[in-house]
Amino acid sequence: MKTKEIENIIAKIHPNISKDYKSDAKVLLFSNVFARLDAFPAMGGDGTIAEYHWDENKIFIYTDLINNEEDIIRSLIHECVHSKQSYDLYMAYYECDLDYHTHPYEIEAEYEEENWEKYKLNTNKFG
C-alpha cells in the first residue's frame, strides 16, 4: 500500500518537476539502498531517501524512509537538479575537501527543494 501510494504521487508530480528542471532522469523505487544493491545492511543502516546516478541517468527513491508527500517532492527536485549538474565537477568539489553541507551542488539542490509546495497534491501522510 505504501509503495503504491508513493508510485501514484510520483506519477502525478514527476512529469512537472522533470519539465521545470529540464531533467529526463528515470525514477525507480526500492525499499532501501541495500535492496537495490542486493546487499546486506551495514550496522546502523542507511539514511538515504534518494540518490541520482549519472552513469545510468536514474533517480532511485527508497520507500522505507519516505514519510509523506513532502519527502517525495523534495527528493525528486533534489535529484532532478543533480541530473543537470556536471558529474566531473561534482566529484572535483569533493576532492577539494568539501563535505555534503559545503558542497555547492548540494547547496543548490537543497535550495531548490524549497520550491516543493509548488508541486504538492495534499495527500495524507502514510501510515
Image (spheres, helix red, strand yellow):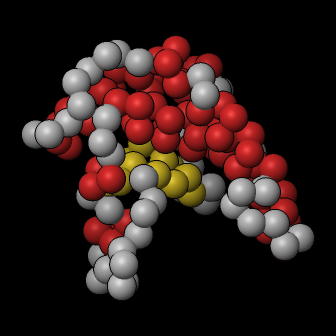
Q: Residue at the spot x=29%, y=83% of the render?
A: 40
- Quick check: can you spot residue 84? no
> Dividing the picture into quarters, in which one does residue 12 lie?
top left
Residue 100: horizontal and vertical position, in percent?
69, 61
Q: Is residue 62 above or below residue 117?
A: below
Q: Quadrant of the C terminus?
A: top left
Say if residue 110 shows up in the picture: yes
Task: Locate residue 46: give its quadrant.
Answer: bottom left
In the figure, 77 relative to 90: above or below?
above
- Eyeballing the image, is 100 above or below 50? below
Q: Nearer the viewer, residue 113 or 4?
A: 113
Residue 20 rendering spot, x and y as whole percentages: 62, 20
Looking at the picture, how far across and down is residue 19, in whole percent?
A: 58, 20
Q: Residue at x 61, y 59 (%)?
A: 55
x 31%, y 35%: residue: 68
109 shown above or below 23? below
Nearer to us in this view, 114 or 93: 114
Where's the N terminus, which quadrant? top left
Residue 44 relative to residue 55: left or right? left
Task: Please indicate whether residue 95 sits to the left or right of residue 64 in the image.
Answer: right
